[in-house]
Image (cartoon, rainbow, N blue to C red):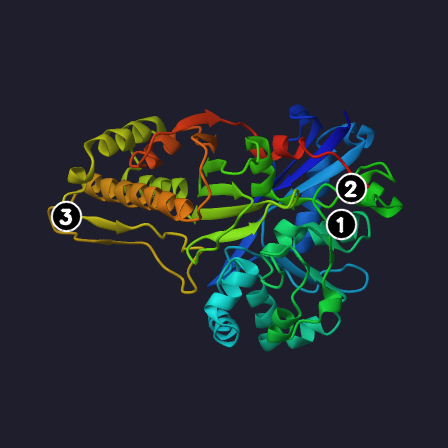
Amino acid sequence: MPTLLGIDVGSSSVIAGILSGKRVLAESPRVFFKSTHAGSKVEVDAEDLLRAVAAAIHGLSGKAKQVDAIALAVMCPAWVAMDKSGKPLTPLVTHQDRRSVEIAREIESRIGKKKHLAITGCRPFPGGISSTTWAWYRKHEPRRLKRADLVGHLNTFLHRHMTGARVTDPSNASFTGLYNTLSLKGWNANLCENIGADPNLLPEIQEADRIAGTITQEASVRFHLRAGTPVMTGLVDGSAGMLLAGANHGQLFNVCGSTDVLALCTQQPRPHEQLLTRALGIENKFVMVGTMAAVASALYWARLQFFQGMSIEDFRKEMFRLAKLGPAAAGTVKFEPYMAGERTSLEQRQGGFSGLTLASTRENMLSAMLEGLIAASAARLPLMQSSGTKILPSIAVSGGSDHLDRLMRRDWSGKWRFRSVTDATMRGLGTLTPKD
C-alpha cells in the first residue's frame, strides 16, 4: 500500500497529512490564510496560499519527503489566471464571490437555461461557476488577461507550481461552466466561445487518481518535498469526502458545519436548477449537491449578537431546547436562512427576519433561525429523490462536533441510518491509488 501525502486546502486553511490507506499517520497543524472581502468580491492572494501550503507541509517535520505520492483536495471554484511562468495574474476568486451577477444573466440568456443545465449540470451561478468570473475579467479588467498562458482552478495552480503540469480533473472542470459535465467529454467549444475564452488556455483534463506530474527540483525546495515525487491530479474536497463515504450509487453524504452540504453519488445524473451537479472526479460517477451556505456560522453569529453573556456550551443547550419545542418557540418571527447567500441562485439572496414585534425576544429570534435552517435542510431530500436515483438508507455524516447535524435533520422524512465519518477529506484522499 503506497504512503501518500494528502494536502487538503479548504476555504480558509490548509492541512497536510501522511496517509496509509484511510489511516492518518501524521497531520500538520492547520495553517490559515486570509480571504479578502470587498463588497461582492471574495479573493485569496495566490502567493499567500502557496506559502500556506508550504508551511503545512513543513509542519510534518520532514515526513513528507518519504511518501510514495501526493494527493490534492481543494476548495472549488478557486479561479486564477497565470502567465507563462505560472505567476498569478489575478487573485484566486473563490466560490463565495458574487461580483458577476450581470455576467451570469448574460451567459444564460445567450446559451439558454435548459441548454446550459443539460451541458454543465448547473446554471451559471455567479462565482460558483467560474465561467462568470472569467467573463467578468474579460469585460472589466482585460489587460490582466492579455498575458494569460493558463487559466484554471486551484489544483491547476498548485500543479503549475509543484510539477509544471497543466492539468485539472473532472470535478473541478465541472465547476468551470465550460465542460461537458454530463457526457464527461472535454471542454465545450460553444461555451468557451460564449464568454470569449481561448480553449488553448485551459488545462488538460485527467481523472483525479492519475499521476499528472512529479515534483520539480525548484518545488522540492519551496514545498519541503522530494524531487521526483509523483503528484496525482487531485479533486474537489467534497469528492474526497464522498470517496471515504463509499461513493456508491445512491450514497448520501452530509457535511454539517459552518456550511451544510448534502451530496448524492450517482451514475445517472438528472440535473436540477436548485442543485449543483458535477463529476465525482474518477470512475465516471457524479455528485448532486445541495448546499446551505451558512448554518453553524449563522447560529454562532446569533450568539455573538444576542447571547454574548452565555457560554458556548449553554448556547448549544439552548439551541437544542428551542428545536425540541418546534416552531411555536419562534412566535410570530420568521427567518430567511441566507446569511451567506445561496449557491443555487443567480441573485445574491440575503438572510432576514420578519414578523418582529415589540414582544419578540432573543429566544424567538434564535428559534426562528433554527426553524428556517431545519426547513431548508429537509427541503433538499425531495430534490435528491427527484433525480430518480434510489437512495441508500445509510447516510454518512461528517462534521457537527457540536451535534448540530442532529438538529438540522430533525424534519427529514423517511427512515435513515446515520454513520459518522471523521477527517473525511484527508482520509478520503487515502482511498486513491496512483495510476500512470
**Which comes before the other along the chain, label 2 or label 1?**
1
Q: Between 62 and 235, which is closer to the camera in this rendering?
A: 235
Residue hosting label 2 = 231
In primary-sequence order, the first of circles 1 and 3 is 1
Q: CA distance from mark 1 to mark 3?
A: 53 Å
Categorize mark 1 by other alpha carbons within 10 Å: few (<14), some (14-19), many (20+): many
How far is disc 3 from disc 2 in space, using C-alphas? 56 Å
Q: Earlier in the sequence, mark 3 or mark 2?
A: 2
> Horizontal and vertical percent for residue 34?
57, 49
Circle 1 SS class:
helix
**Residue 126 in view of the camera:** no
Residue holding disc 3: 332
Q: With respect to residue 170, does 179 lie above or below? A: below
**Residue 231 seen in the current view:** yes
The quadrant of the rendering that contains the N terminus is top right
> Camera-side residue: 398 or 158?
398
Q: Amino acid at mark 1?
A: His
Give the labeled residue for mark 1: 159
Question: Are the residues at dot 3 and dot 2 in contact (C-beta closer than 8 Å)?
Answer: no
Identify the amino acid type marked 3.
Thr
Which quarter shows the C terminus?
A: top right
Disc 2 vs disc 1: Cβ atoms closer than 8 Å? Answer: yes
